[in-house]
Image (spheres, rainbow, N blue to C red):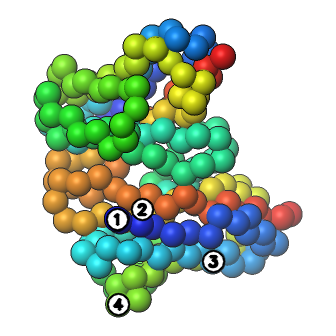
Amino acid sequence: QKEVEQNSGPLSVPEGAIASLNCTYSDRGSQSFFWYRQYSGKSPELIMSIYSNGDKEDGRFTAQLNKASQYVSLLIRDSQPSDSATYLCAVKVPGNTPLVFGKGTRLSVIA
Amino acid sequence: SQTIHQWPATLVQPVGSPLSLECTVEGTSNPNLYWYRQAAGRGLQLLFYSVGIGQISSEVPQNLSASRPQDRQFILSSKKLLLSDSGFYLCAWSVIGGTEAFFGQGTRLTVV
């Protein structure tokens, strides 16, 4: 069974701090990794994708991937109250198969 | 550019009534299409996915069904709703054989 595990939180960080969100996955065949942000009552929005080991930076967001450890993380620098949301980790194996989602981590940025 | 439309945004239905939720994608051909459900405070549960017209894979046995009558149209149905069918229903699409998925705005269904 393919599983994606995330700490449900809530993770509370002060404004301006770095928020660190973590995700582990069970299927070693996974090749594509994604972070979605979901505001309360809204649909998930893709914010980051990563396919190779290492770091990928996009503005205040950095995704980190370690396939050997089956671990993906998302760092949010200079956290803002507007970053308060649930962050969903998703992984995919090659081929015409659906994404497998974790249950999400709720982030609260305190002003 | 590609867009996904899902309607209605909210729906209140009595127990035992039928359901039909529709999703259409514009700006792409032969997309993969997905129906997810998110119960209150829970994760995303994949219900159905389709890789082509008439091709539906069911992930969870239940009183819901899905159909894909046209290339870019995906419909979620039920003949008789249960209280447990309440939730946030999300349609999504991806490029065939592709990676990331993109979500519609969702339908919040309350069964009373």
Label disc, if present, on residue A13 of the rendered structure: none
Same chain under badges 2 and 4? The reply is yes
Estimate the spatial distance between the alpha carbons at disc 1 and disc 3, rounded to whole Å: 27 Å
Q: Marks 1 and 4: which is nearer the front?
A: 1
Residue linked to disc 1: A1
Residue linked to disc 2: A90
**Which amino acid lies under the numbered mark 4 shown in the image of this protein?**
Ala
Same chain under badges 1 and 4? The reply is yes
Residue linked to disc 4: A68
Quarter containing the C terminus of chain A? bottom right
**Contact? badges 1 and 2 (CB < 8 Å):** no
Query: Given the current orientation, which residue lies at the most extreme right position?
Result: A111
Estimate the spatial distance between the alpha carbons at disc 2 and disc 4, rounded to whole Å: 17 Å
The residue drawn where x is 58% and y is 14% is B15
Q: Nearer the viewer, residue A40 or A100?
A: A100
Q: Earlier in the sequence, mark 1 or mark 3?
A: 1
Residue linked to disc 3: A20
The residue drawn where x is 53% and y is 28% is B85
Disc 4 is attached to a residue of which chain?
A
Q: Secondary structure at mark 1?
A: loop
Disc 1 is attached to a residue of which chain?
A
Q: Does residue A39 appear left or right of residue A37 in this picture?
A: right
Q: Residues within 10 Å of mark 3 (few under 14, many from 20)?
A: some
